[in-house]
Amino acid sequence: MSPHGPLTGHTIVVTRPRAQSAHLAEAIAAAGGTPLVFPLLEISPASDPQALQAAAAHIVDYAMAIFVSPNAVDYALPSILANGPWPAGLCPATLGQGSVKALLAHGIEGCIAPTERFDSETLLSLPELAPEKVRGKRIVIFRGDGGRELLADTLRERGAEVDCITCYRRSGPADGAAPLLAAWRAGQLAAITVSSSEGMRYLVDLLDAEGREFLQKTPIFVPHARIAENARALGLSNIILTDAADAGILAGLHAYNWSA
């Protein structure tokens, strides 16, 4: 930990799933801050693996495979590769650069992905997913439970045949809000980082009246405008919108006026 970094003296909550929290937590510590890792979403395999196994067994029948997140890569790819190497004619696509890196780690290159905003809308705006490109094609989307339907619905409207495969599920923290409340009561919680709208809902639902009062006074750093909009819809106002991904959150933390 740096004793004189821009985040010195500040405890900052990292709410990414545990397997994805290390990079941001380490960067906060390197800048002098104290990371409090508190995953709002726990990730586990889908309760019924049959749909994933069936899609994996027939993966060569698809023209494109879309992974909505690094979790989708981590939970779908082992089943796909258990049936053989990645098919030469199967185009990989994803919503963000984290998933691109996860695919590259398995030797899967040529992934179609946004380079700025990381969401379904931006992926759909890419020329490779234009109506004339996807019409008549079979596309499989690997995702978690309860995902948005925009991507699948739009591709179907464009003439594609789309299968959505749930390969992992998300659940709230098992231990409740006790670690957050303890840090707030001790005056040691300076900020919270939240990387998904679903996580934001879990956070609000998790807290009692005392916790929500603390939350209203705590800056919440979010890397996407939709998360900020959902936070405001939940009644929160102290929202700081940053650039995308961990790098954007970290830059926002560095730029924040902590003495205000």
Image (cartoon, grey):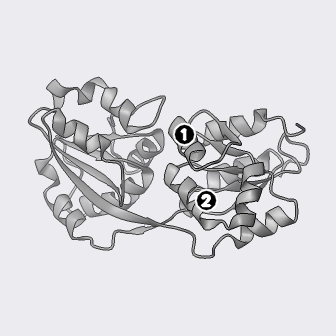
Which quarter of the picture shows residue 56?
Answer: bottom left
Query: Which element is circle 2 on?
Result: helix
Which residue is nearer to you in this view: 5 or 256?
Answer: 256
Left or right, 14 with respect to 62, comes to right
Q: Is residue 255 left or right of residue 119?
A: right
- Secondary structure of residue under mark 1: helix
> Where is 181 relative to 101, above or below?
below
Residue density around tag 2, few if under 14, some if 14–19, many if 20 or more, within 10 Å = some
Q: Amino acid under label 1?
A: Glu
User: Can you give x and y, in whole percent of width and height, for residue 43 in the image?
Assistant: 47, 65
User: What number is the disc on residue 73?
Assistant: none
Residue in view at x 37 percent, y 38 percent: 120
Q: Which residue, given by chain and number where applicable, does mark 1 sit on?
A: 229
The numbered mark, 2 or 1, whose residue comes first in the sequence reads: 2
Write the residue at 24% across / 63% down. Answer: 52
Per the rendering, the mark at residue 204 is 2
> Would you say residue 188 is visible in this rendering?
yes
x then y, percent, for residue 6: 84, 39
- Give the residue at the far bottom of this rendering: 175
Q: List x then y, in percent, for residue 137.
A: 12, 38
Question: Would residue 35 be seen by someone viewing this image from the given angle?
Answer: no
Residue 38 relative to residue 196: left or right: right
Say which amino acid is labelled 2: Val
Q: Quadrant of the C terminus?
A: top right
Q: Going by the picture, which residue comes out furthest to the left? A: 136
In percent of width and height, residue 1 lies at 83, 52
- State the CA–CA distance, disc 2 to disc 1: 14 Å
Total labels: the figure holds 2
